[in-house]
Structure formats: C-alpha cells, structure tokens
Amino acid sequence: MPAENPSELLAEAERIFARMLDLITAINRANARAQFPDKGTLADALAERDISGKRRDFLSSVAEAASTRQDRYSKSEVKFVATVPVSQLRQQIDLLSKRFRELDTQIQEWNWKIDLD
C-alpha cells in the first residue's frame, strides 16, 4: 500500500498546474502593460534581452567552431582554415553580452516596481 494516496497527489498536481497558469498569465499581462524606459513594454524588453542572449550564444558557437585547431601530422592531411572573422565575432559577442547584462539588470529592477493584478 503506498504511503500517500495517488489520486490525492494527482489532484494536488492539477491544482498546482492551474495556479501556475494563473500566475504566468498574470505576469504576461503585467509585462505587456508595463511601460519600460525607451523599449516600449516590459514584454518588449524581455524579448530583446532573450534575442540578445540567443544571438550571443549562436555567435559564440560559430566562433568556437571556427577557432578549433586541427593538428596536422603531414602535408597531405586536410588543413582547416577559419572562413569567418573570429576576432570580429568575439567583438560582437562582447557587445551582445554587455547588452544582455544591461537589459537584464534593468528588467530585474523594473520587476520590483510592477504589481500583478
């Protein structure tokens, strides 16, 4: 015999999911209404932050792949040559990382100022 009633646990899980839906919906509504300095709404700033992070991660992957060193043991082996400007990518990555951090800090500050309805 289980220590807890599975039916009660499933019912509790459903109540938790319903509450999560309520909270997420309220947060999304508040983010869509809240005006964010120079960015439109807080939802707009969140989208910009998320895209900055995704662009940074993508460019980091490209730069990492392009800067992978391949040791050759003879001249007959294929030589790998970077076809993208890794140093320029790294500069873009740095700028995107800075923008992500700045936006994230502003968003965290703004979150303290917004009340859920």
Image: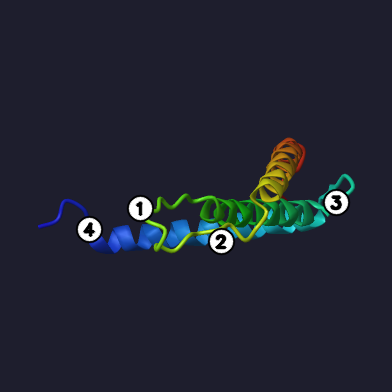
Amino acid type, callout 3: Lys
Q: Secondary structure at mark 1?
A: loop
Secondary element at tag 4: loop
Q: CA distance from mark 2 to mark 4?
A: 25 Å
Name the residue that disc number 2 marks. Answer: 21
The reply to whether dot 1 and dot 4 touch (C-beta < 8 Å) is no
Q: Name the kind of residue labelled 1 in the image.
A: Tyr
In the structure shown, which secondary structural element does the residue marked by tag 3 occupy?
Answer: loop
In this figure, which residue is indicated by the disc labeled 4? 5
| Cα–Cα gap, marks 3 and 4 | 50 Å
Which mark sits nearer the N-terminus, 3 or 4? Answer: 4
Q: Nearer the viewer, residue 99 or 18?
A: 99
Q: Kindly identify which residue carries mark 1.
A: 73
Q: CA distance from mark 1 to mark 4?
A: 66 Å
Neighbourhood count class around disc 2 (C-alpha, 10 Å): few under 14, some 14–19, many 20 upward:
few
Give the number of the mark in front: 2 or 3: 3
